[in-house]
């Protein structure tokens, strides 16, 4: 059964010590008087000291001395800024001396202070060297007040006064400047500084920006805040409505017409014979025209013609054609004009068309291959198939009763017909749509679609053109940010980013987190809430210091997880109550390096990597162990100042699974942000978590591998 343990996490390059303002020995102060600040009571004189505590946040200089007396003498040798010291009674084994911290602050008489200004530090002595010499003089009814947080005495001013000694009267008290104005205190007066567009004692008046403005062509001026606008009547535009809009833009007058611009309108001046808004209508010149004698009016352009029935002629078909002209009735016969015909009135004994002799076929020509047959005082033309009429002069209309489909037109032949089809159709009756996709190849996977006398290629995404032959440039209208370059792909694009940036449009930058000084107060607190039975810890790191440094650790009831970079290039890993030392070849030359540790509980496999290369691997370490997700991760915090971290980190992640060597080698190839960050600890959240002490973030960072 797997082991399970709870912990309160301390994760960082230094192990945290939670300070509780409680010491093994009580504070001892020398002096004659006492005072309170918060819940603490102190005795104070011109000089005083306290054991097992140290003043925090005011250390200006650290030196090595032989004794507390020597430490006090060093402080007194400095200028007046040195007020107190923190003396370590434990002798350093290497230096064979005691650490002496020189403070720029101390405790002043008749003042309170906050207990959190002191740290519980076993073995230290806090010693006040120089006394405080500050007084308090408040004017205009102000009272002196102790400030525990700054160790100073300040004036608490009455309402309407301000200043270090309450010496200034606030004439803006109770004054409200309207419309965003700001009150400015003067000597026994005030003034309202108004935003642009307003005026008045209290900025209560909106300046009329329409004064002196004339909107042309009937426009109306509308006052704005520090501006104006002209509301133009239809047909005009411009700042002052001074531009007549050209309404002819985009207008095409048909059939030779010319566009003329009007105010908010246009008119088409048409050539003779046409009318309409766009000259699109041919004027019907047949209106009011009557063609006589059964004639039909046909409209022309700015004209007409009368199509007359046979036997009539003239502009309006008003004239009956004299069919007797050129006709000779033989043998004393008389010609009589008919409608589109004539007749010969023969004298007795003669007959036939022209009162000729009995052979009525003489002089008769049956047309189109017809044969004349003589009759009694008459003849008959026998016509070949397809023709009819007295002389076989009429071609029988074989298109009667025939419908050519899809807009086709029937054409009469001799005893036959044909359908003249519109482009795109074929067949006896134009009933078949021609497949225009025959012989057409749409490129790049496109599909041909048959249209009427045409075709279209339906292209797959990313292509265009008549035959889908063109790759669409997906980089058009794409802007890669921060100097990135767009590269066209099939129905897609990618931005090639300059070093230090990433993202779809190179909008995201890499970041570094810097720990600038050695301090137990430098820390990033990160919540740890997910249980894990395996883990992979990876980070980019830049080291220069040769001391032991903690990249990661936590502790809960003497159980926990921890990492320590050692001076010999190895790494110490602690899980639960077990620990192991792995070779890692850590370099401290100030260059960026990628460091990883992977562990799993199934077989206890634990491996270390540097710059994507496997350095060391062991088995059976904490087999069956687990990490319960309860606690707070402290990044870069160590109670021992000698092991505090200084340097830079980037892409700090912890995953809840055992990564392969291939995955780790891929991450080590670049400092760019990862697409799949850690699920236990993610870099995108780490770099946006609150940073305490001298911890800072820089984006873009300097890690450009």
Image (spheres, grey):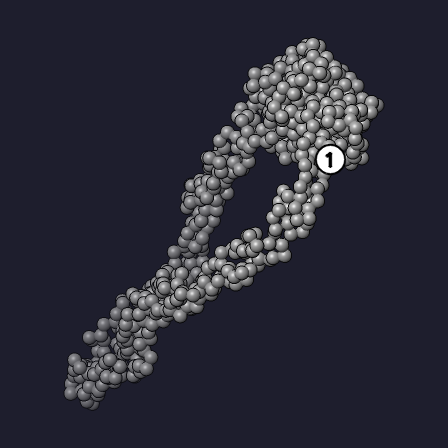
Q: Residue at x 55, y 52 (%)?
A: 186
Image-quadrant location for residue 65: top right
Residue 187 rendering spot, x and y as whole percentages: 55, 52
User: Residue at image x 31%, y 74%?
Assistant: 299
In the rendering, at what x and y percent does residue 626 appear?
Answer: 78, 25
**From the viewer's perspective, is residue 227 above or below residue 476?**
below
SS under mark 1:
loop
Q: Position of residue 204 (x, y in %)?
A: 55, 62
Front one among 272 and 249: 249
Q: Is residue 229 visible?
A: yes
Residue 669 vs residue 324: left or right? Answer: right
Q: Is residue 415 visible?
A: no
Q: Position of residue 636 (x, y in %)?
A: 67, 25
Mark 1 lies on residue: 111
Number of marks in picture: 1
Q: Nearer the viewer, residue 153 or 331?
A: 153
Q: Residue at x 55, y 36 (%)?
A: 508
Residue displayed at 36% across by 61% down: 249
Residue 396 vertical placement versus 444 (above, below)? below
- Nearest to the observer: residue 359 or residue 27: 27
Instruction: Tell me: 685 left or right of 31.
Output: left
């Amino acid at each position: 059964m797997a082991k399970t343990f709870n912990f309160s996490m301390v994760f960082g390059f230094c192990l945290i010590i939670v300070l509780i303002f409680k010491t093994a020995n009580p504070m001892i102060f020398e002096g004659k008087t006492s005072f309170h600040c918060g819940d603490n009571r102190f005795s104070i004189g011109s000089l005083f000291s306290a054991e097992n505590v140290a003043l925090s946040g005011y250390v200006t200089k650290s030196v090595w001395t032989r004794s507390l007396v020597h430490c006090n003498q060093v402080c007194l040798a400095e200028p007046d800024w040195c007020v107190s010291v923190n003396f370590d009674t434990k002798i350093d084994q290497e230096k064979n001396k005691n650490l002496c911290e020189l403070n720029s602050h101390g405790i002043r008489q008749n003042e309170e202070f906050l207990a959190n200004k002191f740290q519980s530090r076993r073995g230290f002595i806090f010693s006040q060297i120089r006394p405080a010499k500050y007084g308090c003089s408040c004017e205009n009814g102000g009272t002196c007040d102790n400030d525990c947080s700054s160790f100073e005495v300040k004036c608490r001013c009455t309402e309407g006064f301000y200043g270090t000694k309450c010496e200034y009267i606030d004439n803006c008290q109770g004054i409200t400047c309207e419309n965003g104005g700001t009150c400015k205190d003067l000597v026994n007066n005030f003034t309202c500084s108004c935003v642009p567009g307003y005026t008045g004692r209290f900025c209560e008046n909106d300046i009329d920006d329409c004064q002196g403005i004339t909107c042309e062509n009937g426009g109306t001026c509308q006052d704005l805040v520090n501006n104006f606008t002209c509301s133009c009547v239809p047909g005009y535009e411009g700042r002052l409505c001074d531009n007549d809009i050209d309404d002819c833009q985009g207008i095409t007058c048909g059939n030779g017409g010319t566009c003329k611009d009007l105010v908010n309108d246009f008119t088409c001046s048409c050539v003779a014979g046409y009318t309409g808004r766009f000259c699109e209508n041919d004027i019907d010149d047949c209106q009011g025209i009557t063609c006589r004698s059964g004639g039909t009016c046909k409209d022309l352009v700015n004209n007409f013609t009368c199509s007359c029935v046979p036997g009539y002629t003239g502009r309006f078909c008003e004239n009956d054609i004299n069919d007797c002209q050129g006709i000779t009735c033989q043998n004393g016969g008389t010609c009589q004009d008919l409608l589109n015909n004539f007749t010969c009135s023969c004298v007795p004994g003669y007959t036939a068309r022209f009162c000729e002799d009995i052979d009525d076929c003489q002089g008769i020509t049956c047309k189109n291959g017809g044969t004349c047959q003589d009759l009694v005082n008459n003849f008959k033309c026998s016509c070949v198939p397809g023709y009819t009429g007295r002389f076989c002069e009429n071609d029988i209309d074989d298109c009667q009763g025939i419908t050519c489909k899809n807009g086709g037109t029937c054409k009469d032949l001799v005893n036959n017909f044909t359908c003249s089809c519109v482009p795109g159709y074929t067949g006896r009756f134009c009933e078949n749509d021609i497949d225009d996709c025959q012989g057409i190849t749409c490129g790049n996977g496109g599909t041909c679609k048959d249209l009427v006398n045409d075709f279209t290629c339906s292209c797959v995404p990313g292509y265009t053109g008549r035959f889908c032959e063109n790759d669409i440039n997906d980089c058009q209208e794409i802007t890669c940010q921060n100097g990135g370059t767009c590269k066209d792909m099939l129905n897609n694009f990618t931005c090639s980013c300059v070093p230090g940036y990433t993202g779809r449009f190179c909008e995201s930058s890499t970041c570094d987190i810097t720990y600038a000084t050695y301090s137990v107060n430098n820390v990033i607190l990160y919540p740890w809430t997910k249980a894990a039975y395996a883990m992979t810890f990876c980070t980019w790191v830049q080291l220069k210091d040769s001391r032991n440094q903690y990249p990661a650790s936590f502790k809960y009831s003497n159980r926990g997880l921890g990492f320590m970079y050692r001076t010999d290039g190895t790494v110490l890993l602690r899980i639960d109550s077990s620990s192991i030392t792995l070779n890692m070849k850590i370099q401290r030359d100030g260059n960026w390096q990628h460091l990883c540790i992977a562990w799993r509980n199934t077989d206890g496999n634990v491996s270390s990597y540097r710059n994507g290369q496997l350095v060391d691997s062991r088995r059976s370490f904490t087999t069956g162990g687990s990490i319960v997700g309860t606690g707070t991760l402290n990044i870069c915090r160590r109670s021992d100042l000698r092991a505090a971290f200084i340097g830079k980190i980037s892409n700090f992640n912890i995953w809840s699974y055992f990564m392969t060597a291939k995955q780790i080698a891929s991450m080590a190839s670049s400092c760019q942000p990862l697409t799949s960050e850690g699920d236990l600890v993610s870099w995108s959240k780490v770099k946006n978590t609150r940073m305490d002490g001298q911890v800072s973030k820089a984006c873009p960072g300097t890690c450009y591998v």
